[in-house]
Amino acid sequence: MKALKDILYKVSLTSTIGDMDVEVKDLVFDSRKVQAGSVFIAVRGTQVDGHDFIAAALEKGAKSIVCETLPDQLLEHVTYVQVVDSSRALGVMAANYFENPSEKMKLVAVTGTNGKTSTVTLLYQLFREMGYNVGLVSTVENKINDTVIPATHTTPDAIALQSLLKQMVEAGCTHAFMEASSHAIVQERMAGLHLAGAVFTNISHDHLDYHSTFDAYINAKKKLFDELPKDAFALVNADDKRALVMLQNCRATKQTYALKYPADFKAKVLSNTIEGLELDINNKQIWFRMIGEFNAYNLLAVFGVAVLLGEDEEEVLMQLSKVKGAQGRFDRISMYGITAIVDYAHTPDALENVLKTIQGVRTGGEQVITVVGCGGNRDRTKRPIMAKIATQFSDKVILTSDNPRDEEPMAILREMEAGINPVDFKKTMIIEDRREAIKTAGILAKKGDIILIAGKGHETYQEIKGVKYPFDDREVVKEVLNLLNKN
Ligand SMILES: CC(=O)N[C@H]1[C@@H](OP(=O)(O)OP(=O)(O)OC[C@H]2O[C@@H](n3ccc(=O)[nH]c3=O)[C@H](O)[C@@H]2O)O[C@H](CO)[C@@H](O)[C@@H]1O[C@H](C)C(=O)N[C@@H](C)C(=O)N[C@H](CCC(=O)O)C(=O)O
Ligand SMILES: Nc1ncnc2c1ncn2[C@@H]1O[C@H](COP(=O)(O)OP(=O)(O)OP(=O)(O)O)[C@@H](O)[C@H]1O
Ligand SMILES: N[C@H](CCC[C@H](N)C(=O)O)C(=O)O
Ligand SMILES: [Mg+2]
Protein backbone atom coordinates (compact mmCIF):
# COMPACT_ATOMS: atom_id res chain seq x y z
CA MET A 1 0.00 0.00 0.00
CA LYS A 2 1.16 3.50 -0.82
CA ALA A 3 0.19 6.23 1.63
CA LEU A 4 -0.35 9.79 0.42
CA LYS A 5 2.14 11.23 2.90
CA ASP A 6 4.95 9.04 1.53
CA ILE A 7 4.25 10.04 -2.03
CA LEU A 8 4.40 13.69 -1.02
CA TYR A 9 8.01 13.35 0.18
CA LYS A 10 10.01 16.41 -1.01
CA VAL A 11 6.91 18.21 -2.37
CA SER A 12 6.64 21.89 -1.28
CA LEU A 13 3.37 22.01 0.65
CA THR A 14 1.32 25.06 1.59
CA SER A 15 -1.35 23.31 3.67
CA THR A 16 -3.04 19.95 4.15
CA ILE A 17 -6.58 19.05 5.20
CA GLY A 18 -7.67 15.51 6.03
CA ASP A 19 -6.10 12.08 6.39
CA MET A 20 -2.52 12.00 5.08
CA ASP A 21 -2.33 8.22 5.49
CA VAL A 22 -5.03 7.65 2.88
CA GLU A 23 -4.12 4.94 0.39
CA VAL A 24 -3.15 6.07 -3.11
CA LYS A 25 -4.46 3.71 -5.81
CA ASP A 26 -2.98 5.73 -8.63
CA LEU A 27 -1.89 9.24 -9.64
CA VAL A 28 -3.95 11.07 -12.23
CA PHE A 29 -3.76 14.58 -13.71
CA ASP A 30 -6.68 14.14 -16.11
CA SER A 31 -10.08 14.01 -14.40
CA ARG A 32 -11.38 11.79 -17.21
CA LYS A 33 -9.00 9.04 -16.12
CA VAL A 34 -9.80 9.12 -12.40
CA GLN A 35 -10.82 5.84 -10.74
CA ALA A 36 -11.95 5.09 -7.21
CA GLY A 37 -9.03 5.85 -4.88
CA SER A 38 -7.01 8.01 -7.29
CA VAL A 39 -5.14 11.13 -6.25
CA PHE A 40 -6.12 13.91 -8.66
CA ILE A 41 -3.47 16.55 -9.26
CA ALA A 42 -4.95 19.76 -10.64
CA VAL A 43 -2.51 21.30 -13.13
CA ARG A 44 -2.87 24.63 -14.90
CA GLY A 45 -2.43 23.94 -18.62
CA THR A 46 -2.22 25.87 -21.85
CA GLN A 47 -5.86 25.21 -22.78
CA VAL A 48 -7.70 24.79 -19.49
CA ASP A 49 -7.10 24.83 -15.74
CA GLY A 50 -7.13 21.42 -14.06
CA HIS A 51 -8.56 23.13 -10.94
CA ASP A 52 -11.86 23.41 -12.85
CA PHE A 53 -12.06 19.60 -12.92
CA ILE A 54 -11.67 18.90 -9.20
CA ALA A 55 -15.41 18.34 -8.78
CA ALA A 56 -15.46 15.97 -11.77
CA ALA A 57 -12.52 14.04 -10.29
CA LEU A 58 -14.29 13.71 -6.94
CA GLU A 59 -17.43 12.50 -8.63
CA LYS A 60 -15.43 9.71 -10.27
CA GLY A 61 -14.10 8.60 -6.88
CA ALA A 62 -10.87 10.53 -6.27
CA LYS A 63 -9.96 10.24 -2.58
CA SER A 64 -7.43 13.06 -2.47
CA ILE A 65 -6.80 16.28 -4.34
CA VAL A 66 -3.50 18.05 -4.88
CA CYS A 67 -3.92 21.65 -5.99
CA GLU A 68 -2.49 25.17 -5.78
CA THR A 69 -5.79 26.80 -4.86
CA LEU A 70 -8.26 25.02 -2.57
CA PRO A 71 -11.85 24.74 -3.79
CA ASP A 72 -14.39 26.95 -1.96
CA GLN A 73 -16.31 23.94 -0.72
CA LEU A 74 -14.37 21.15 0.92
CA LEU A 75 -15.86 17.66 1.21
CA GLU A 76 -15.49 15.48 4.25
CA HIS A 77 -13.57 12.21 3.77
CA VAL A 78 -11.47 13.85 1.05
CA THR A 79 -7.85 14.82 1.67
CA TYR A 80 -6.82 18.19 0.21
CA VAL A 81 -3.16 19.01 -0.26
CA GLN A 82 -2.31 22.54 -1.23
CA VAL A 83 1.06 22.85 -2.97
CA VAL A 84 3.21 25.69 -4.26
CA ASP A 85 3.39 24.30 -7.80
CA SER A 86 1.11 21.49 -8.98
CA SER A 87 3.14 20.58 -12.07
CA ARG A 88 6.26 20.23 -9.98
CA ALA A 89 4.37 18.31 -7.31
CA LEU A 90 3.15 15.93 -10.02
CA GLY A 91 6.74 15.22 -11.13
CA VAL A 92 8.02 14.61 -7.61
CA MET A 93 4.97 12.52 -6.65
CA ALA A 94 5.32 10.40 -9.78
CA ALA A 95 8.99 9.77 -8.94
CA ASN A 96 8.05 8.70 -5.38
CA TYR A 97 5.10 6.61 -6.55
CA PHE A 98 7.31 4.61 -8.94
CA GLU A 99 10.05 4.32 -6.27
CA ASN A 100 12.52 6.76 -7.79
CA PRO A 101 13.76 4.59 -10.66
CA SER A 102 16.19 7.24 -11.89
CA GLU A 103 18.21 6.80 -8.69
CA LYS A 104 18.74 3.14 -9.56
CA MET A 105 20.53 3.69 -12.87
CA LYS A 106 22.62 6.24 -14.74
CA LEU A 107 20.19 8.53 -16.52
CA VAL A 108 21.46 11.20 -18.92
CA ALA A 109 19.21 13.87 -20.46
CA VAL A 110 19.98 15.68 -23.70
CA THR A 111 18.50 19.09 -24.49
CA GLY A 112 18.94 21.55 -27.36
CA THR A 113 16.98 22.69 -30.40
CA ASN A 114 18.52 20.08 -32.71
CA GLY A 115 20.35 16.84 -32.21
CA LYS A 116 18.53 15.44 -29.16
CA THR A 117 17.10 12.35 -30.86
CA SER A 118 20.31 11.78 -32.80
CA THR A 119 22.47 12.02 -29.67
CA VAL A 120 20.34 9.84 -27.38
CA THR A 121 19.92 7.22 -30.11
CA LEU A 122 23.67 7.07 -30.63
CA LEU A 123 24.16 6.77 -26.87
CA TYR A 124 21.61 3.98 -26.70
CA GLN A 125 23.26 2.10 -29.60
CA LEU A 126 26.76 2.61 -28.20
CA PHE A 127 25.90 1.34 -24.71
CA ARG A 128 24.03 -1.64 -26.21
CA GLU A 129 27.15 -2.40 -28.29
CA MET A 130 29.20 -2.22 -25.10
CA GLY A 131 27.00 -4.91 -23.57
CA TYR A 132 24.79 -2.95 -21.19
CA ASN A 133 21.04 -3.13 -20.59
CA VAL A 134 19.86 0.26 -21.77
CA GLY A 135 16.72 2.39 -21.90
CA LEU A 136 15.89 5.07 -24.46
CA VAL A 137 13.34 7.89 -24.30
CA SER A 138 13.09 9.70 -27.63
CA THR A 139 10.85 11.39 -30.18
CA VAL A 140 11.03 8.40 -32.50
CA GLU A 141 10.50 5.62 -29.99
CA ASN A 142 11.10 4.54 -26.42
CA LYS A 143 13.07 1.39 -25.82
CA ILE A 144 13.79 -1.00 -23.00
CA ASN A 145 16.73 -2.97 -24.35
CA ASP A 146 15.36 -4.22 -27.69
CA THR A 147 11.68 -3.83 -26.84
CA VAL A 148 10.08 -0.85 -28.55
CA ILE A 149 7.45 1.20 -26.76
CA PRO A 150 5.81 3.77 -29.03
CA ALA A 151 6.51 7.40 -28.17
CA THR A 152 3.77 10.04 -28.03
CA HIS A 153 5.98 12.95 -27.03
CA THR A 154 9.68 13.79 -27.15
CA THR A 155 9.59 13.74 -23.33
CA PRO A 156 6.59 11.87 -21.86
CA ASP A 157 4.45 13.33 -19.08
CA ALA A 158 5.76 12.77 -15.55
CA ILE A 159 3.65 9.69 -14.82
CA ALA A 160 4.39 7.99 -18.15
CA LEU A 161 8.08 8.87 -17.80
CA GLN A 162 8.52 7.53 -14.27
CA SER A 163 6.52 4.40 -15.10
CA LEU A 164 8.73 3.79 -18.14
CA LEU A 165 11.90 4.29 -16.09
CA LYS A 166 10.62 1.84 -13.50
CA GLN A 167 10.10 -0.78 -16.22
CA MET A 168 13.67 -0.12 -17.37
CA VAL A 169 14.99 -0.76 -13.87
CA GLU A 170 12.93 -3.95 -13.65
CA ALA A 171 14.45 -5.09 -16.96
CA GLY A 172 17.91 -4.62 -15.46
CA CYS A 173 18.83 -1.40 -17.29
CA THR A 174 21.92 0.21 -15.82
CA HIS A 175 21.80 3.20 -18.19
CA ALA A 176 19.09 5.27 -19.81
CA PHE A 177 19.26 8.17 -22.24
CA MET A 178 16.42 10.61 -22.65
CA GLU A 179 15.50 13.74 -24.59
CA ALA A 180 14.54 16.78 -22.55
CA SER A 181 12.27 19.03 -24.62
CA SER A 182 11.90 22.63 -23.57
CA HIS A 183 8.14 22.05 -23.16
CA ALA A 184 8.87 19.21 -20.74
CA ILE A 185 11.34 21.26 -18.71
CA VAL A 186 8.94 24.18 -18.34
CA GLN A 187 6.01 21.89 -17.56
CA GLU A 188 8.11 20.09 -14.89
CA ARG A 189 7.65 16.69 -16.53
CA MET A 190 11.20 15.99 -15.30
CA ALA A 191 10.82 17.16 -11.70
CA GLY A 192 11.93 14.45 -9.29
CA LEU A 193 14.41 12.82 -11.67
CA HIS A 194 17.91 12.07 -10.55
CA LEU A 195 20.22 12.73 -13.50
CA ALA A 196 23.77 11.45 -13.79
CA GLY A 197 24.37 14.10 -16.40
CA ALA A 198 22.87 16.46 -18.94
CA VAL A 199 23.97 17.59 -22.39
CA PHE A 200 23.30 20.85 -24.25
CA THR A 201 23.64 20.47 -28.03
CA ASN A 202 22.71 23.92 -29.35
CA ILE A 203 19.94 26.50 -29.40
CA SER A 204 18.36 28.19 -32.39
CA HIS A 205 14.98 29.36 -33.61
CA ASP A 206 12.04 27.12 -32.66
CA HIS A 207 8.92 26.95 -30.50
CA LEU A 208 8.53 30.71 -30.11
CA ASP A 209 4.77 30.12 -30.27
CA TYR A 210 5.05 28.39 -26.88
CA HIS A 211 7.90 30.23 -25.16
CA SER A 212 7.05 33.70 -26.62
CA THR A 213 10.62 35.05 -26.59
CA PHE A 214 14.02 33.62 -27.41
CA ASP A 215 15.20 34.51 -23.89
CA ALA A 216 12.38 32.48 -22.36
CA TYR A 217 13.33 29.57 -24.63
CA ILE A 218 16.99 29.83 -23.50
CA ASN A 219 15.88 29.95 -19.86
CA ALA A 220 13.78 26.82 -20.36
CA LYS A 221 16.88 24.90 -21.45
CA LYS A 222 18.99 26.50 -18.70
CA LYS A 223 16.56 25.29 -16.02
CA LEU A 224 17.69 21.70 -16.72
CA PHE A 225 21.26 22.66 -15.81
CA ASP A 226 20.25 24.86 -12.84
CA GLU A 227 18.60 21.83 -11.28
CA LEU A 228 21.34 19.25 -11.83
CA PRO A 229 22.69 17.73 -8.61
CA LYS A 230 26.28 18.32 -7.56
CA ASP A 231 27.35 14.78 -8.39
CA ALA A 232 26.18 15.03 -12.01
CA PHE A 233 28.01 16.33 -15.05
CA ALA A 234 26.90 19.12 -17.38
CA LEU A 235 28.33 18.71 -20.86
CA VAL A 236 27.78 21.65 -23.21
CA ASN A 237 28.69 22.44 -26.81
CA ALA A 238 31.24 25.25 -26.42
CA ASP A 239 30.81 26.26 -30.09
CA ASP A 240 27.27 27.43 -29.32
CA LYS A 241 27.26 30.94 -27.97
CA ARG A 242 24.68 30.12 -25.28
CA ALA A 243 26.75 27.27 -23.81
CA LEU A 244 28.11 29.32 -20.93
CA VAL A 245 24.67 30.70 -20.11
CA MET A 246 23.56 27.10 -19.56
CA LEU A 247 26.29 26.67 -16.95
CA GLN A 248 25.82 30.02 -15.15
CA ASN A 249 23.93 28.63 -12.15
CA CYS A 250 24.92 25.00 -12.44
CA ARG A 251 26.37 23.06 -9.48
CA ALA A 252 27.33 19.97 -11.47
CA THR A 253 30.80 19.23 -12.91
CA LYS A 254 31.11 21.49 -15.95
CA GLN A 255 32.48 19.98 -19.14
CA THR A 256 32.60 21.20 -22.75
CA TYR A 257 32.89 19.72 -26.24
CA ALA A 258 33.67 21.58 -29.45
CA LEU A 259 35.02 21.43 -32.96
CA LYS A 260 36.11 25.09 -33.04
CA TYR A 261 36.62 26.53 -29.55
CA PRO A 262 38.92 25.09 -26.87
CA ALA A 263 37.06 22.39 -24.92
CA ASP A 264 37.47 19.34 -22.71
CA PHE A 265 36.42 17.07 -25.57
CA LYS A 266 37.76 18.15 -28.98
CA ALA A 267 37.36 16.71 -32.45
CA LYS A 268 38.46 17.68 -35.93
CA VAL A 269 36.67 16.77 -39.15
CA LEU A 270 39.25 15.13 -41.42
CA SER A 271 36.83 14.29 -44.22
CA ASN A 272 33.11 14.63 -44.79
CA THR A 273 31.61 12.83 -47.79
CA ILE A 274 28.31 11.23 -48.78
CA GLU A 275 29.75 7.94 -47.45
CA GLY A 276 30.53 9.20 -43.95
CA LEU A 277 32.74 11.23 -41.67
CA GLU A 278 36.35 10.85 -40.67
CA LEU A 279 37.10 12.47 -37.34
CA ASP A 280 40.15 12.99 -35.22
CA ILE A 281 39.15 12.52 -31.59
CA ASN A 282 41.95 12.67 -29.01
CA ASN A 283 44.57 12.03 -31.71
CA LYS A 284 42.78 8.96 -32.99
CA GLN A 285 41.37 8.85 -36.50
CA ILE A 286 37.98 7.21 -36.67
CA TRP A 287 35.60 6.58 -39.54
CA PHE A 288 31.85 6.95 -38.90
CA ARG A 289 28.91 6.05 -41.09
CA MET A 290 27.12 9.29 -40.33
CA ILE A 291 27.24 12.31 -42.60
CA GLY A 292 27.66 16.02 -41.97
CA GLU A 293 29.43 18.29 -39.53
CA PHE A 294 26.40 18.33 -37.23
CA ASN A 295 26.87 14.61 -36.72
CA ALA A 296 30.48 15.27 -35.74
CA TYR A 297 29.01 17.30 -32.87
CA ASN A 298 26.60 14.52 -31.97
CA LEU A 299 29.32 11.86 -32.04
CA LEU A 300 31.65 14.00 -29.96
CA ALA A 301 28.91 14.63 -27.38
CA VAL A 302 28.31 10.88 -27.20
CA PHE A 303 32.03 10.23 -26.73
CA GLY A 304 32.09 12.84 -23.93
CA VAL A 305 29.09 11.34 -22.15
CA ALA A 306 30.52 7.83 -22.32
CA VAL A 307 33.86 8.96 -20.89
CA LEU A 308 32.14 11.00 -18.17
CA LEU A 309 30.13 7.90 -17.27
CA GLY A 310 33.42 6.10 -16.69
CA GLU A 311 33.85 4.15 -19.92
CA ASP A 312 37.24 3.44 -21.45
CA GLU A 313 38.07 5.94 -24.25
CA GLU A 314 39.53 3.40 -26.69
CA GLU A 315 36.67 0.97 -26.26
CA VAL A 316 34.16 3.79 -26.75
CA LEU A 317 35.75 4.94 -30.00
CA MET A 318 35.94 1.40 -31.33
CA GLN A 319 32.27 0.66 -30.62
CA LEU A 320 31.11 4.12 -31.67
CA SER A 321 32.37 3.59 -35.21
CA LYS A 322 29.76 0.81 -35.58
CA VAL A 323 26.64 2.83 -34.70
CA LYS A 324 24.11 3.80 -37.34
CA GLY A 325 22.20 6.76 -35.94
CA ALA A 326 18.50 7.52 -35.70
CA GLN A 327 15.79 6.78 -38.26
CA GLY A 328 14.75 9.64 -40.52
CA ARG A 329 17.93 11.60 -39.86
CA PHE A 330 19.79 11.90 -43.15
CA ASP A 331 18.24 8.61 -44.34
CA ARG A 332 19.67 7.91 -47.78
CA ILE A 333 17.70 6.05 -50.43
CA SER A 334 19.56 5.53 -53.70
CA MET A 335 17.55 4.31 -56.69
CA TYR A 336 18.06 4.59 -60.43
CA GLY A 337 21.07 6.83 -59.90
CA ILE A 338 19.06 9.34 -57.86
CA THR A 339 19.81 9.92 -54.17
CA ALA A 340 16.85 10.80 -51.97
CA ILE A 341 17.58 12.03 -48.47
CA VAL A 342 14.80 11.97 -45.88
CA ASP A 343 15.57 14.20 -42.94
CA TYR A 344 13.63 15.45 -39.92
CA ALA A 345 14.95 19.01 -40.37
CA HIS A 346 11.96 21.05 -39.19
CA THR A 347 13.75 24.14 -37.92
CA PRO A 348 15.63 26.81 -39.91
CA ASP A 349 18.95 25.79 -38.37
CA ALA A 350 18.48 22.07 -39.06
CA LEU A 351 17.40 22.73 -42.65
CA GLU A 352 20.41 24.94 -43.27
CA ASN A 353 22.73 22.33 -41.74
CA VAL A 354 21.34 19.54 -43.86
CA LEU A 355 21.46 21.58 -47.06
CA LYS A 356 25.00 22.80 -46.33
CA THR A 357 25.99 19.20 -45.68
CA ILE A 358 24.55 18.21 -49.04
CA GLN A 359 26.36 21.12 -50.72
CA GLY A 360 29.56 20.00 -48.98
CA VAL A 361 29.37 16.44 -50.30
CA ARG A 362 28.29 17.31 -53.85
CA THR A 363 30.70 16.10 -56.43
CA GLY A 364 29.71 17.78 -59.66
CA GLY A 365 26.90 19.37 -61.60
CA GLU A 366 24.06 17.48 -59.93
CA GLN A 367 20.93 19.39 -58.93
CA VAL A 368 19.63 19.56 -55.37
CA ILE A 369 15.83 19.43 -55.32
CA THR A 370 14.28 20.19 -51.93
CA VAL A 371 10.76 19.22 -50.86
CA VAL A 372 9.82 20.94 -47.61
CA GLY A 373 6.88 22.21 -45.56
CA CYS A 374 6.18 23.56 -42.08
CA GLY A 375 3.87 22.11 -39.45
CA GLY A 376 0.54 23.71 -38.60
CA ASN A 377 -0.32 24.80 -35.01
CA ARG A 378 3.39 25.46 -34.46
CA ASP A 379 5.73 28.45 -34.54
CA ARG A 380 4.67 30.54 -37.56
CA THR A 381 7.75 32.73 -37.64
CA LYS A 382 9.98 29.90 -38.85
CA ARG A 383 7.93 29.43 -42.05
CA PRO A 384 9.33 32.25 -44.27
CA ILE A 385 12.84 31.62 -42.94
CA MET A 386 12.78 27.93 -43.81
CA ALA A 387 11.47 28.64 -47.33
CA LYS A 388 14.22 31.19 -47.86
CA ILE A 389 16.92 28.77 -46.69
CA ALA A 390 15.53 26.08 -48.99
CA THR A 391 15.81 28.35 -52.03
CA GLN A 392 19.25 29.64 -51.04
CA PHE A 393 20.82 26.21 -50.95
CA SER A 394 18.83 24.27 -53.59
CA ASP A 395 18.50 24.34 -57.37
CA LYS A 396 14.78 23.65 -57.20
CA VAL A 397 12.35 23.85 -54.31
CA ILE A 398 8.90 22.37 -53.92
CA LEU A 399 7.02 23.82 -50.97
CA THR A 400 4.46 21.37 -49.67
CA SER A 401 2.48 20.40 -46.59
CA ASP A 402 4.13 18.96 -43.48
CA ASN A 403 1.51 18.20 -40.79
CA PRO A 404 -0.98 21.02 -41.38
CA ARG A 405 -2.87 19.94 -38.23
CA ASP A 406 -5.81 22.36 -37.79
CA GLU A 407 -4.50 25.05 -40.11
CA GLU A 408 -5.37 25.66 -43.76
CA PRO A 409 -2.50 24.03 -45.72
CA MET A 410 -2.40 26.76 -48.38
CA ALA A 411 -2.25 29.48 -45.71
CA ILE A 412 0.91 27.87 -44.27
CA LEU A 413 2.41 27.65 -47.76
CA ARG A 414 1.68 31.33 -48.44
CA GLU A 415 3.48 32.25 -45.20
CA MET A 416 6.46 30.19 -46.32
CA GLU A 417 6.42 31.74 -49.79
CA ALA A 418 6.59 35.24 -48.28
CA GLY A 419 10.19 34.56 -47.25
CA ILE A 420 11.46 33.83 -50.75
CA ASN A 421 13.45 36.42 -52.72
CA PRO A 422 11.59 37.28 -55.94
CA VAL A 423 14.62 36.18 -58.00
CA ASP A 424 14.14 32.70 -56.61
CA PHE A 425 10.47 32.40 -57.56
CA LYS A 426 11.36 30.71 -60.82
CA LYS A 427 12.98 27.79 -59.06
CA THR A 428 10.11 27.38 -56.58
CA MET A 429 6.84 25.49 -56.90
CA ILE A 430 3.98 25.08 -54.46
CA ILE A 431 2.28 21.69 -54.42
CA GLU A 432 0.00 21.25 -51.43
CA ASP A 433 -0.27 17.46 -51.63
CA ARG A 434 2.94 15.98 -50.22
CA ARG A 435 2.80 12.81 -52.31
CA GLU A 436 2.37 14.88 -55.50
CA ALA A 437 5.23 17.12 -54.40
CA ILE A 438 7.56 14.14 -53.92
CA LYS A 439 6.41 12.72 -57.25
CA THR A 440 7.18 16.02 -58.98
CA ALA A 441 10.66 16.01 -57.44
CA GLY A 442 11.08 12.51 -58.88
CA ILE A 443 9.99 13.70 -62.31
CA LEU A 444 12.38 16.65 -62.18
CA ALA A 445 15.34 14.59 -61.00
CA LYS A 446 17.93 13.36 -63.46
CA LYS A 447 20.58 10.70 -62.83
CA GLY A 448 23.02 11.93 -60.18
CA ASP A 449 20.60 14.44 -58.67
CA ILE A 450 19.84 14.69 -54.96
CA ILE A 451 16.29 15.03 -53.62
CA LEU A 452 16.01 16.28 -50.04
CA ILE A 453 12.66 15.58 -48.39
CA ALA A 454 12.72 17.55 -45.17
CA GLY A 455 10.58 17.97 -42.06
CA LYS A 456 8.99 14.61 -41.28
CA GLY A 457 11.91 12.17 -41.06
CA HIS A 458 10.74 9.03 -39.25
CA GLU A 459 7.07 10.06 -39.03
CA THR A 460 4.71 7.47 -40.47
CA TYR A 461 1.63 9.68 -40.66
CA GLN A 462 0.47 13.06 -41.89
CA GLU A 463 -1.91 14.95 -39.63
CA ILE A 464 -4.55 16.94 -41.49
CA LYS A 465 -7.55 18.48 -39.68
CA GLY A 466 -7.37 16.13 -36.71
CA VAL A 467 -6.92 12.94 -38.77
CA LYS A 468 -3.60 11.09 -38.96
CA TYR A 469 -3.28 9.53 -42.42
CA PRO A 470 -0.57 6.91 -43.02
CA PHE A 471 2.34 8.65 -44.73
CA ASP A 472 6.03 7.83 -44.74
CA ASP A 473 8.38 9.98 -46.82
CA ARG A 474 10.79 7.05 -47.18
CA GLU A 475 8.09 4.74 -48.59
CA VAL A 476 6.56 7.40 -50.79
CA VAL A 477 9.85 8.34 -52.44
CA LYS A 478 10.61 4.68 -53.12
CA GLU A 479 7.16 4.13 -54.67
CA VAL A 480 7.49 7.25 -56.78
CA LEU A 481 10.96 6.43 -58.09
CA ASN A 482 9.91 2.86 -58.85
CA LEU A 483 6.86 4.14 -60.68
CA LEU A 484 8.89 6.56 -62.72
CA ASN A 485 11.51 3.83 -63.15
CA LYS A 486 14.12 6.32 -64.27
CA ASN A 487 16.67 4.96 -66.68
C1 LIG B 1 1.48 22.58 -25.32
C2 LIG B 1 1.78 21.36 -24.52
O1 LIG B 1 2.91 21.01 -24.34
N1 LIG B 1 0.70 20.70 -24.01
C3 LIG B 1 0.91 19.53 -23.15
C4 LIG B 1 0.21 19.78 -21.84
O2 LIG B 1 -1.13 19.99 -22.12
P1 LIG B 1 -1.85 21.34 -21.67
O3 LIG B 1 -1.01 22.02 -20.66
O4 LIG B 1 -2.23 22.10 -22.88
O5 LIG B 1 -3.18 20.75 -21.00
P2 LIG B 1 -4.63 21.37 -20.97
O6 LIG B 1 -5.43 20.74 -22.05
O7 LIG B 1 -4.58 22.86 -20.89
O8 LIG B 1 -5.17 20.79 -19.59
C5 LIG B 1 -4.68 21.23 -18.30
C6 LIG B 1 -4.90 20.14 -17.30
O9 LIG B 1 -6.30 19.89 -17.15
C7 LIG B 1 -6.53 18.52 -17.23
N2 LIG B 1 -7.89 18.24 -17.70
C8 LIG B 1 -8.32 18.68 -18.91
C9 LIG B 1 -9.59 18.39 -19.36
C10 LIG B 1 -10.45 17.62 -18.55
O10 LIG B 1 -11.60 17.29 -18.86
N3 LIG B 1 -9.98 17.21 -17.33
C11 LIG B 1 -8.73 17.51 -16.89
O11 LIG B 1 -8.36 17.09 -15.81
C12 LIG B 1 -5.46 18.00 -18.17
O12 LIG B 1 -5.22 16.62 -18.02
C13 LIG B 1 -4.27 18.84 -17.75
O13 LIG B 1 -3.61 18.23 -16.66
O14 LIG B 1 0.33 18.67 -21.01
C14 LIG B 1 -0.18 17.44 -21.56
C15 LIG B 1 0.07 16.34 -20.55
O15 LIG B 1 1.43 16.27 -20.21
C16 LIG B 1 0.54 17.12 -22.87
O16 LIG B 1 0.01 15.95 -23.46
C17 LIG B 1 0.36 18.29 -23.82
O17 LIG B 1 1.11 18.00 -24.97
C18 LIG B 1 0.47 18.34 -26.22
C19 LIG B 1 -0.40 17.17 -26.69
C20 LIG B 1 1.55 18.66 -27.26
O18 LIG B 1 1.31 18.64 -28.45
N4 LIG B 1 2.75 18.98 -26.83
C21 LIG B 1 3.89 19.26 -27.70
C22 LIG B 1 3.94 20.71 -28.15
C23 LIG B 1 5.15 18.91 -26.92
O19 LIG B 1 5.12 18.74 -25.70
N5 LIG B 1 6.23 18.77 -27.63
C24 LIG B 1 7.52 18.46 -27.02
C25 LIG B 1 8.59 18.42 -28.10
C26 LIG B 1 8.81 19.69 -28.78
C27 LIG B 1 10.13 19.67 -29.51
O20 LIG B 1 11.19 19.80 -28.87
O21 LIG B 1 10.12 19.55 -30.74
C28 LIG B 1 7.50 17.07 -26.41
O22 LIG B 1 8.18 16.86 -25.39
O23 LIG B 1 6.88 16.18 -27.01
N1 LIG C 1 23.85 18.56 -33.58
C1 LIG C 1 23.04 19.04 -34.51
N2 LIG C 1 23.07 20.37 -34.83
C2 LIG C 1 22.25 20.87 -35.75
N3 LIG C 1 21.38 20.15 -36.48
C3 LIG C 1 21.29 18.84 -36.20
C4 LIG C 1 22.11 18.22 -35.21
N4 LIG C 1 21.81 16.91 -35.17
C5 LIG C 1 20.83 16.72 -36.06
N5 LIG C 1 20.52 17.87 -36.71
C6 LIG C 1 19.50 18.13 -37.74
O1 LIG C 1 18.30 18.40 -37.04
C7 LIG C 1 17.28 17.44 -37.39
C8 LIG C 1 16.61 16.98 -36.12
O2 LIG C 1 17.56 16.20 -35.40
P1 LIG C 1 17.09 15.41 -34.13
O3 LIG C 1 15.87 14.69 -34.42
O4 LIG C 1 18.26 14.68 -33.60
O5 LIG C 1 16.77 16.68 -33.20
P2 LIG C 1 15.81 16.83 -31.96
O6 LIG C 1 16.50 17.84 -31.11
O7 LIG C 1 15.55 15.53 -31.36
O8 LIG C 1 14.46 17.40 -32.56
P3 LIG C 1 12.99 17.45 -31.81
O9 LIG C 1 12.98 18.72 -31.05
O10 LIG C 1 12.00 17.48 -32.87
O11 LIG C 1 12.87 16.26 -30.93
C9 LIG C 1 18.01 16.30 -38.07
O12 LIG C 1 17.18 15.67 -38.99
C10 LIG C 1 19.18 16.99 -38.70
O13 LIG C 1 18.74 17.61 -39.87
N1 LIG D 1 8.59 17.94 -31.95
C1 LIG D 1 8.29 18.83 -33.05
C2 LIG D 1 8.24 18.05 -34.30
C3 LIG D 1 7.90 18.82 -35.54
C4 LIG D 1 7.88 17.91 -36.75
C5 LIG D 1 7.22 18.47 -37.96
N2 LIG D 1 7.03 17.39 -38.89
C6 LIG D 1 5.87 19.11 -37.60
O1 LIG D 1 4.90 18.36 -37.57
O2 LIG D 1 5.80 20.31 -37.39
C7 LIG D 1 6.98 19.54 -32.76
O3 LIG D 1 6.04 18.89 -32.31
O4 LIG D 1 6.95 20.76 -32.93
MG1 LIG E 1 13.78 14.66 -30.83
Image (cartoon, helix red, strand yellow):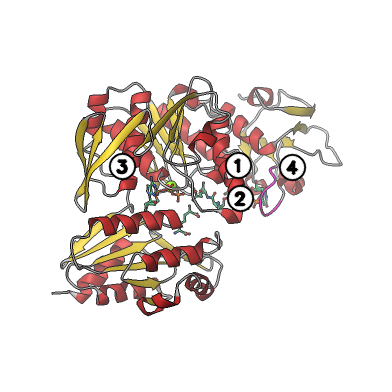
Q: Quadrant of the C terminus?
A: bottom left
Q: Which mark is residue 211?
A: 2
- The residue mark sitting in front, 1 or 3, is 3
Locate residue 45 relative to residue 307 in the image: left or right: right
- The residue mark sitting in front, 3 or 4, is 3
Q: Residue at x 42, y 71 (%)?
A: 400
Q: Which residue is drawn at 38% across and 66% down?
A: 392
Q: Name the residue under label 3.
A: 296
Q: Is mark 2 on a helix, strand or loop?
A: helix
Marks 1 and 3, how far apart in space? Answer: 29 Å
* Mark 4, other Cα within 10 Å: few <14 / some 14–19 / many ≥20: many
Q: Residue at x 26, y 73 (%)?
A: 442
Q: Residue 58 carries which label?
A: 4
Marks 4 and 1, how far apart in space? Answer: 28 Å
Q: Which mark is residue 186?
A: 1
N-terminal of the pair, mark 3 or mark 4, is 4
Q: Is mark 1 on a helix, strand or loop?
A: helix
- The residue mark sitting in front, 4 or 2, is 2
